Amino acid sequence: MASNAVKEFTDSNFDQEVLKSDKPVLVDFWAEWCMPCRMLAPTIDDLAKQYDGKVKIGKVDTDANRDTAVKFDIQSIPTIILFKGGEVVHKFVGVTPKPDFEAELNKVAG
């Protein structure tokens, strides 16, 4: 699922890992059966390596972590949400080109 640089967020660790993080966090809401999610996975892996130490990047399996998916009104996957200071900064829906992610990440990465 996730590479070494990509963290796994769950219902039980989401508040601590994402909402209380001192760094911006990019969260990929995905599911194993979702082909567009699989297409996006290499991009998420690349971003995790590229922004290592500046932005925390991880995934939430929406099938296994329904509470978190419902809390953030995930209607379709992949949905990728950028958080900073526990707040939603930007929301991407669908397969998104890497430069679009980079533009938003560069605004928050400091």
Image (cartoon, rainbow, N blue to C red):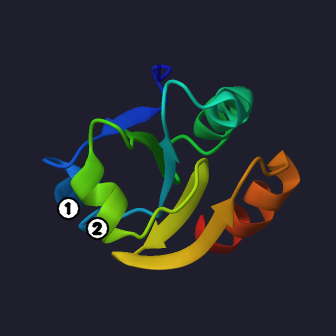
Image side of residue 94 versus residue 74, left or right: right
Q: Quadrant of residue 45?
A: top right
- Judge by depth and name the residue closer to the eye, 45 or 107: 45
Report if residue 110 is visible in the image.
no
Q: Is residue 51 above or below residue 37?
A: below
Q: Residue at x 65, y 26 (%)?
A: 38
Circles 1 and 2: CB distance less than 8 Å? yes
* Quadrant placement of the C terminus: bottom right
* Amino acid on which disc 1 is placed: Asp
Report if residue 106 is visible in the image.
yes
Q: Residue at x 42, y 70 (%)?
A: 73
* Amino acid on which disc 2 is placed: Leu
- Judge by depth and name the residue closer to the eye, 99 or 54: 99
Neighbour tally class for label 1: few under 14, some 14-19, many 20 plus, Cα within 10 Å: some
Q: Please state the horizontal and vertical placement of residue 37, each as a whole percent of the image.
A: 64, 35
Q: Is residue 86 above or below residue 22?
A: below
Q: Please state the horizontal and vertical placement of residue 11, each as a whole percent of the image.
A: 19, 49
Name the element at disc 1. helix
Q: Residue at x 46, y 69 (%)?
A: 83
Image side of residue 13 versus residue 93, left or right: left
Q: Please state the horizontal and vertical placement of residue 61, each as a whole percent of the image.
A: 39, 37
Image side of residue 65 versus residue 47, left or right: left
Q: Residue at x 48, y 34 (%)?
A: 31
Q: Which residue is mark 1?
A: 15
User: Which residue is farthest left?
Assistant: 12
Q: Quadrant of residue 85?
A: bottom left
Name the element at disc 2. helix
Mark number displayed over residue 24: none
Q: Which residue is mark 2?
A: 19
The CA span between labels 1 and 2 is 5 Å
Neighbour tally class for label 2: few under 14, some 14-19, many 20 plus, Cα within 10 Å: some
